[in-house]
């Protein structure tokens, strides 16, 4: 059954401005299964490209080369201080090197935490940490399960 796609913000000028900024299709939000119908989403996940996202369906973790991403995300909660969802991680083992490596898929639970002002828009807050828990099996090579999230576009 397709998930209902919505954005919910407070009915203030700030919230309306944020909602307009998040209006492209990538920014559509999925209402969490356990949330009240008119929830307010004041905390965002800032992606690799410096764009704020509310309840994204996928998250690129390896911004430089695309060798690690989360997909099929279904969020069961998203509030001011944390968010919890499930989906899969698709990660390249880079064996013998990344261009010749193999992508592997792992079922995961994802937790977002931290809540700080986002320099990109002083009216929005952003999550600072993403933590992955593996449901069945996890990568057998050295691999992080905690990521410090971006606060703006990559530079350099």
Image: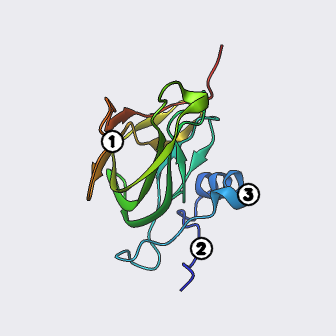
Q: Secondary structure at mark 2?
A: loop
How many numbered marks appear? 3
- Residue visible at 59% across and 56% down in the picture: 15
Residue 79 visible to an observer of this rendering: yes
Question: Earlier along the polypeptide chain: callout 2 or callout 3?
Answer: 2
Q: Return the residue nearer the eye: 9 or 7.
A: 7
Q: How is the image coloured?
A: rainbow
Residue 48 % position (x, y) = 59, 35
Residue 106 % position (x, y) = 38, 54
Q: Return the residue nearer the eye: 73 or 117.
A: 73
On the picture, is 147 further left or further right than 46?
Answer: left
| 50 shown above or below 64 | below
On the picture, is 89 further left or further right than 134?
Answer: right
Instruction: Please give the label number shown on residue 5.
Output: 2
> Tag 3: Cα neighbours inside 10 Å, few (<14), some, or many (≥20)?
few
- Residue visible at 49% across and 30% down in the picture: 94
Of circles 1 and 3, the one toward us is 1
Disc 1 from disc 2: Cα separation: 32 Å
Residue located beneath label 3 in the image? 24
Q: Return the residue nearer the eye: 137 or 82.
A: 137
Q: Return the residue nearer the eye: 19 or 46.
A: 46
Residue 92 % position (x, y) = 49, 38
- Residue visible at 27% across and 50% down in the picture: 133
Residue located beneath label 1 in the image? 139
Residue 46 % position (x, y) = 54, 40
| 21 shown above or below 79 | above
Question: Earlier along the polypeptide chain: callout 1 or callout 2?
Answer: 2
Q: On the rendered image, what quadrant is the C terminus found in?
A: top right
């Amino acid at each position: 059954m397709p998930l209902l796609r919505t954005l919910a913000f407070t009915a203030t000028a700030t919230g309306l401005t944020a909602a307009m900024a998040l209006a492209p299709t990538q920014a559509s939000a999925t209402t969490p299964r356990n949330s009240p119908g008119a929830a307010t989403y004041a905390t965002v996940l800032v992606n690799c490209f410096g764009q704020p996202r509310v309840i994204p369906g996928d998250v690129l973790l390896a911004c430089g080369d695309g060798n690690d991403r989360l997909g099929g995300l279904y969020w069961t909660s998203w509030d001011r201080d944390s968010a919890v969802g499930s989906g899969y991680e698709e990660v390249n083992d880079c064996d013998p090197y990344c261009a010749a490596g193999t992508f592997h898929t792992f079922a995961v639970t994802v937790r977002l935490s931290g809540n700080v002002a986002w320099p990109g828009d002083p009216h929005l807050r952003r999550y600072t940490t993403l933590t992955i828990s593996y449901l069945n099996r996890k990568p057998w090579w050295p691999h992080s399960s905690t990521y410090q999230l971006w606060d703006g576009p990559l530079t350099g």
